[in-house]
Amino acid sequence: MVDPVELPAGIVERVLEGLPVVYPTTTLPALGCLPQPDALDNLFELKKRSETKIVSLGVCDLEQAANLVEIPDIASDILDFFPAGSLTLILPAIETLDPRLGGDNVAVRVLADVRARKLVSETGPLTATSANPSGEEPASDCVTAAEILNLSPSAAFPGQCVGGAPSTLIRWNVSGNALQDSDWTVIREGKVRAEEIQAWSMQRT
């Protein structure tokens, strides 16, 4: 269930037209667009981001990503154990997606911010890359982040973000190797430390 939040006028329509928007998360403002080629073209040009650097997808729950990625039962378990929004899971794509989304392996973050959850509940999954030109420090205010990217204030969901460490990025191990030390491999440490993931995984065996 998505908490009741009033969306800024026109922001959903903008997304559905393939244009990027800035929305708040529990860490920093995110730059969101539909996971479609034309929309991704706009986003990567706006961020001046190398097309070899993939972007993650933000969803309001795992079910929303079910037509894009394979979701193991263990994914719900690990998300329920750690703080909401603290993990981004790299999961196998059902069909190969745009390389800028990871192709056969897609990073999915279940958003915790109620404003972000309301937005993606209306639009479907959106990219969740940071709302800043590549290589520059991100702003904590969504409208300010939009202005830095030369976007209209109407392209932003007004709101301040608390900042702090990013979500921890982990990849589900699908090798089927019974000797695998962990169900998950930590790709980038953030709000959750690698040893916490390891400890959680080991206590399940």
Image (spheres, grey):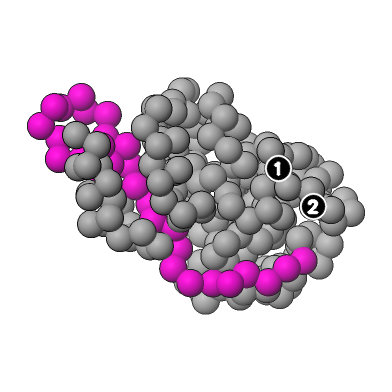
Is 205 within the magenta?
Answer: no
Nearer to me, 86 or 204: 204
Residue drawn 32% across the image and 37% down it: 172
Q: How many marks?
A: 2
Decide which of 197, 100 is in the foreground and name it: 197
Task: For label 2, count other residues whose C-alpha is less than 10 Å away and answer few (under 14), some (14-19) or many (20+).
Answer: few
Quadrant of the rendering where the N terminus is positioned: top right
Cβ atoms at labels 2 and 1 below 8 Å apart: yes
Q: Secondary structure at mark 2?
A: loop
Q: Amino acid at mark 2?
A: Val
Quarter residue 39 falls in: top right
Name which quarter of the figure residue 71 lies in: top left
Residue closest to the eye, 168 or 21: 168
Measured from the top left, where is residue 87 in percent x and y?
43, 51
Q: Which mark is residue 5?
A: 2
Note whether residue 42 is visible.
no
Give the residue at mark 1. Answer: 2
**Dot 1: element:** loop
Which region of the structure is painted magenta?
158-185
Q: Position of residue 152 (x, y in %)?
A: 81, 66
Residue type at mark 1 is Val
Q: Is residue 179 magenta?
A: yes
From the viewer's perspective, is 153 left or right of 62? Answer: right
